Image: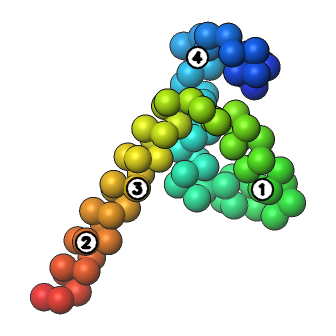
């Protein structure tokens, strides 16, 4: 249903928006293989998630946030290993 609304470019309901945010988090956090241990299933899910989150501002915001968190963690671990 969420995918159909996005394809039709209809506004999402609040619950659907939350689902998209959670799906985006799973995708950009590289957690698909945990949620879908079967490689074929994970690939299929990734394809659908990319289509679902395509052109949604919230997906880009989630990715930007995750990238920022990862950069901070990397910098902190690099700094700690030098000490």
Q: CA distance from mark 1 to mark 3?
A: 21 Å
Q: Secondary structure at mark 1?
A: helix
In the visual, does 24 lie left or right of 67? Answer: right
Disc with the residue nearer the chain's start (1 vs 2): 1
Which image quadrant: the C terminus? bottom left
Q: Which residue is mark 4?
A: 15
Q: CA distance from mark 3 to mark 2?
A: 12 Å
Nearer to us of marks 1 and 3 is 3
The residue sitting at 56% across, 21% down in the picture is 17
Residue 34 position within the rendered picture, expressed as x and y whole percent measured from the top left:
66, 59
Residue indicated by mark 1: 42
Residue placed most toward the observer, 64 or 27: 64
- Horizontal arrangement in the rendering, residue 45 relative to residue 34 (left or right): right
Q: CA distance from mark 4 to mark 3?
A: 25 Å
> Which residue is denoted by mark 2 in the rendering?
75
Residue at screen point 37% across, 61% down: 70
Crowd rating for badge 4 (residues with CA inside 10 Å; few <14, some 14–19, many 20+):
few
Query: Which one is in front in this view, the residue at disc 1 or the one at disc 2?
Result: 2
Q: Earlier in the sequence, mark 1 or mark 3?
A: 1
Q: Are marks 4 and 3 in contact (CB under 8 Å)?
A: no
Q: Are marks 1 and 4 in contact (CB under 8 Å)?
A: no
The residue tagged 3 is: 67
């Amino acid at each position: 249903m969420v995918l159909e609304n996005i394809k039709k470019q209809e506004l999402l309901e609040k619950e659907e928006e939350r689902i998209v945010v959670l799906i985006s988090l799973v995708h950009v956090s590289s957690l698909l293989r945990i949620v879908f241990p079967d490689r074929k299933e994970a690939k299929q899910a990734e394809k659908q998630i990319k289509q679902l989150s395509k052109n949604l501002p919230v997906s880009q915001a989630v990715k930007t946030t995750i990238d920022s968190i990862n950069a901070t963690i990397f910098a902190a671990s690099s700094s700690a290993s030098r000490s």
